[in-house]
Image (cartoon, rainbow, N blue to C red):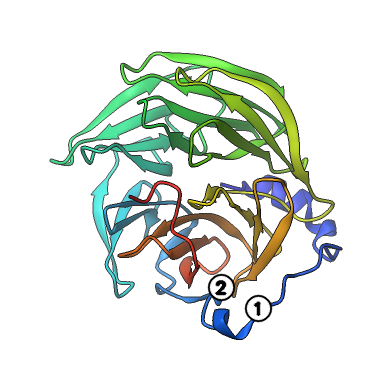
Amino acid sequence: MYRTIVFAGMALLMGACSSIPLVQKNAREAHLFESKDFTAAVFTNNIEGPAVYHDSLFVVNLDQDGTIAYVDTGGKAQVYLTLPQGSTGNAIRFDPKGNMYIADFTGHNVLMVDRSKKVSVLCHNPQFNQPNDLCRSHYGYIIASDPNWKDTTGQLWRVEPDGKFYLLAQNMGTTNGVCLSPDEKTLYVNESVQKKVWAYDIDTMGNINNKRLFTSFTDYGLDGMHCDKKGNLYVCRHGKGMIAIFNPEGELIREVPLNGKLCSNLIFGGRDGKTVYVTLQDRHNMERFRTDTPGAEWP
């Protein structure tokens, strides 16, 4: 999530133009990478955290903050559950059994919701600024970004299946989007205000090292990210209304324009994993576009 306090401070940057060229589409790709509205404007301005379990789509904050929505294939949203008072979802992830994990940024928790919709606290960490985005490894651990928007700083945490938490990195910029490469050997983390995307080596235990700059920008902000199965990284350009797509070498290969400007997160889904769903804070809705490669987490 890209917090309003930061967006206001960056308003002067909105008119800047990226100098990175767009890759032109050929005729075969004409139907791909064209974003269209998917849902009505029924979410709050904290719409975030799209996630899929098989081909079912879930999103946070329908009608009011603190709700989790199920969105059907026609784009109709309904409340799936309401979180306990004091909790607000920001990101959602699933494990193979269908348990839902939620970054609760107001309660300083990572919540778990089982298939019966029972909500429990997997991890309460008083050291959290606010858990923002999550990614989950098939080894079972969760990586959580933890920005401090007021101070434009951030941290990075690992949460184990038993709820124990470990600080992986501190004194970063405003940590926001996090995701793993398809082989789960690289962890990507972006810093919204600093407009940087970092890459780390990550092992099977969730330990990180070899931090290096993957890419950086001179304008707008950054929010949610995901990889496709080829290892291409899709980055929400918050404020620009664009999804920037990079190959594993850090080269921009495409930009996908959206109808809204404040894109907060994205997920791959649909029957074949080639539909990208994007949450838009300014339009309180979701858009979607087709891509040529399924998401990294797709079977």
Residue 2 appears in the figure: yes
Q: Position of residue 176 (x, y in %)?
A: 60, 39
Q: Along the line of sight, which residue is nearer the eye, 111 or 179?
A: 179
Q: Secondary structure at mark 2?
A: loop
Q: Which residue is mark 2?
A: 33
In-image side of 18 versus 198 (left or right): right
Specify the amino acid type for callout 1. Lys
In-image side of 55 versus 216 (left or right): left
Of pointers 1 and 2, the one earlier in the residue sequence: 1
The residue at 18%/41% (across/down) is: 117
Kindly check if marks 1 and 2 are in contact, taking CB atoms under 8 A apart as contact.
yes
Residue 240: image tag: none
Q: Secondary structure at mark 1?
A: loop
Q: Position of residue 23 (x, y in %)?
A: 72, 70
Does residue 57 lie above or below 91 as drawn? below
The residue at 40%/68% (across/down) is: 42
Q: Nearer the viewer, mark 1 or mark 2?
A: 1
Please, which residue is most extreme toward the left here? 116
In-image side of 120 versus 28 (left or right): left
Does residue 44 lie above or below 260 as drawn? above
Residue 108 appears in the figure: no
The residue at 57%/30% (across/down) is: 146
Q: Position of residue 266 (x, y in %)?
A: 50, 56
Circle 2: is it few (<14), some (14-19), or many (20+) Cα within 10 Å?
many
* Cα distance between the residues tagged 1 and 2: 9 Å
The residue at 13%/40% (across/down) is: 116
Specify the amino acid type for callout 2. Phe
Residue 25: image tag: 1
Circle 1: is it few (<14), some (14-19), or many (20+) Cα within 10 Å?
few
Q: Along the line of sight, which residue is nearer the eye, 205 or 68?
A: 205
Q: Position of residue 152 (x, y in %)?
A: 73, 34
